Image (cartoon, rainbow, N blue to C red):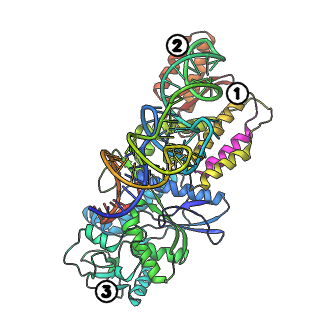
Amino acid sequence: MKVTSTLFGQKEEFLPPGSEVKMYVCGVTPYDESHIGHAMSYIIFDAIRRYLTYRGYRVRYVQNVTDIDDKIIDRAARLKIPASELAKKYTDSFFADMEKLNILKADVYPRATEEIPKIIEVIKGLVDKGFAYPASSGVYFRVRSDPDYGKLSHRTLDSMVAGARIEPGEEKEHPMDFALWKAAKPGEPSWPSPWGTGRPGWHIECSAMSLRYLGETIDIHGGGQDLIFPHHENEMAQSEGFTGKKPFVRYWLHNGLLQLGEQKMSKSLGNLITIKDALAKFSADALRIFILSSHYRSPLTYSEEALEAAERGAERLRTALHSEDTGDKASNINAETYRQRFTEAMDDDFNSSQALAVLFDLARDINRLRDEGNSTETGKQLLVELAGVLGLTLKSREDTFTDAAPFIELLIYIRKQLREAKQYQLADMVRNKLAELDIALEDTPKGTSWKRKR
RNA sequence: GGCGACGUAGCCAAGUGGUUAAGGCGGCGGUCUGCAAAACCGCUAUCCACCGGUUCGAAUCCGGUCGUCGCCUCCA
C-alpha cells in the first residue's frame, strides 16, 4: 500500500508498526452549520478508514471538537447565549449530518473544553523545556526554538515573515510565535491555569488530544489542505517539542478543497452550501460518489450538474443491486478479479476514482447476467461488499417515500387495467403525471415497479 | 512577493515512459417494449493547454509560455 504524505510530497509505502492504525482527523469548530466542504473531508477519511479496516488493520479513529475559540465566543455573544450552548447546538447538528452521510463514528470525540488539564500539562512542559514563554496576554510558542519549523508546509521562517501581515504591538519574541494559551478578557469563558485564567489557543487542543488518546506517535493525521499552515505545522512543532519524539505523525494526509464556482467554499467567504441543503436535493450516496470520483488530494468544484450526474450513477448501482433476476443458472462473476482490481486501486494512494470504476463495471456485469437469465447473487454480494468499503449504502430511495407507496401501487393497478383494455392514452397519462411527481414507472415481465427519480 | 497544485472527449474524471488513453453523466444508433423507462450491445479523445528538449519511444521526464486555483489571516 502506498500513500502520499504532505511532509515529503511523494508516495511512500504505508507501513504502520503494528496491526492497529492510529488515525486522527481534525474535526469542526461548531459555531454554525457544517457545509459540504466538511462533508468532503469527512467522507474521504471515512472511506480511507473503511478501506484500512477492509485490509485487515484495526483502526483507532479520533476526531476532535474544538468547542471553544474566538468565533464561538463572538457568535455566542451576538446571539446573547452562552458559548457552551452554541457549541453544543452545532456539535449535535454536525453529528446528525455525519450520520446521514453514513460516516462511521469515531472511537473518541474529545472536546477542547473537556481536555483542559491535558492541555495545561502540554503547555507547562513546553514552557519548562524552553519551547514556550508566558507573557501578559498568554503563553506563546517560540518558533525559533524549533529548527524544523516550516517543514510540513515547506516554507522557512524568513519567507513567512516576508509575506506575513505582522500585527504590531504584540508581546511576541518573533512575529510567527503563536498562542498556546490566551488570557481571558472580561466576560469570556475561561479556565484557571498557572498563567492566570484563560483558554487554549487554536492548535494546542489537537496536540493534547492526540497525545492523550493515541500516544506520542500516530500513523495518520488527516484534514483539509487549508490546515497545513498554520494549524498542522504548529501542532507538529508543539507535539514534537513536548515529547522530544519524532515523528509526531507518520503520514500526513490532506484532502483538496471543495470549490464553489471559482472559489473555495468557506465560512468566511460566505459562499457555502450546508450539508443539510445538499442532502435535501441529493442522496448521501450521490454526494459520496461525487466526492470519491476524483482523487482526494485534488480540488473539486461543486455544481448541481455534477451532483445530478453522480445521482444517476448512484441510481445505476442501485438498479444493479435491487433488480430481481429470473434465472437460476449459476453466476459466473469472477469475484476475485474484481476484488483484486478494487484493492490495487485503493492500495495506490486511495485511488477511489478507479475503485468506483470497478463498481460500475461490476454493475454492468450483474445486469448482463440478469438479462441473460443467470443468477446474480454472487455479483450482488460482491457489489454490497465493495460499495460498503467506500461507504455507499445503495439503499433504494423509495424507502424514504413509504407514506405514498399504497397510493402509487393503486395508480399502478389502475394503469394495468387501462393497458389491458388497450386504453394506452389514459395509461400513459397516469405514467406521465407520476413522472411529474418524480415517480418513474418501469414495466417488466414481472409487472410494473416504481422508483423515485430524485 | 514566497510556497504549492492543476490544465485529458460536450461535462465530470482516472491514467505519470511503451497495451485498444479507465469509469460516470450526456449524445447518437440498435435490441427489448403497445409506446416508454430501465437494462444490454455498438459508436462518441489518432490524442492529452501551447512551444521547445531528453529518449528507440512521452499525456506521462526536463525547460519555457499562457491560463486556473489553493496556502502564506479564521477555515475541512
Tag 2 and tag 1 share a subunit: yes
Residue carrying label 3: A134
Tag 3 and tag 2 share a subunit: yes
Give, as a single range, the part of the protein colored magenta: A374-398
Identify the residue at horizontal 45%, vertical 83% (top origin).
A242
Residue A378 part of the magenta-drawn span: yes
Rendering coords of residue A83 (x, y %) = 33, 68
Residue carrying label 1: A371
Q: Nearer the viewer, mark 3 or mark 2?
A: 3
Give the residue type at disc 2: Leu
Q: Mark 3 belongs to which subunit? A: A
Identify the residue at horizontal 38%, vertical 60% (top origin).
A226
Identify the residue at horizontal 77%, vertical 36% (top origin).
A331
Disc 2 is placed on an element classified as helix
Residues tagged 3 and 2 counted as in contact (Cβ below 8 A): no
C-alpha distance separating marks 1 and 3: 74 Å
Residue A238: quadrant of the picture: bottom left
Q: Would residue A437 be seen by someone viewing this image from the given angle? A: yes
C-alpha distance separating marks 3 and 2: 82 Å
Image quadrant holding the N terminus of chain A, namely bottom right
Give the residue type at disc 1: Asp
Which residue is the extreme one toward the right? A329
Q: Of marks 2 and 1, which one's residue comes earlier in the chain?
A: 1
Rendering coords of residue A320 (x, y %) = 64, 35
Rendering coords of residue A66 (x, y %) = 40, 68
Which residue is the extreme one toward the bottom? A128
From the viewer's perspective, tell me whether residue A365 is left or right of residue A112.
right
Residue carrying label 2: A426
Q: Mark 2 belongs to which subunit? A: A
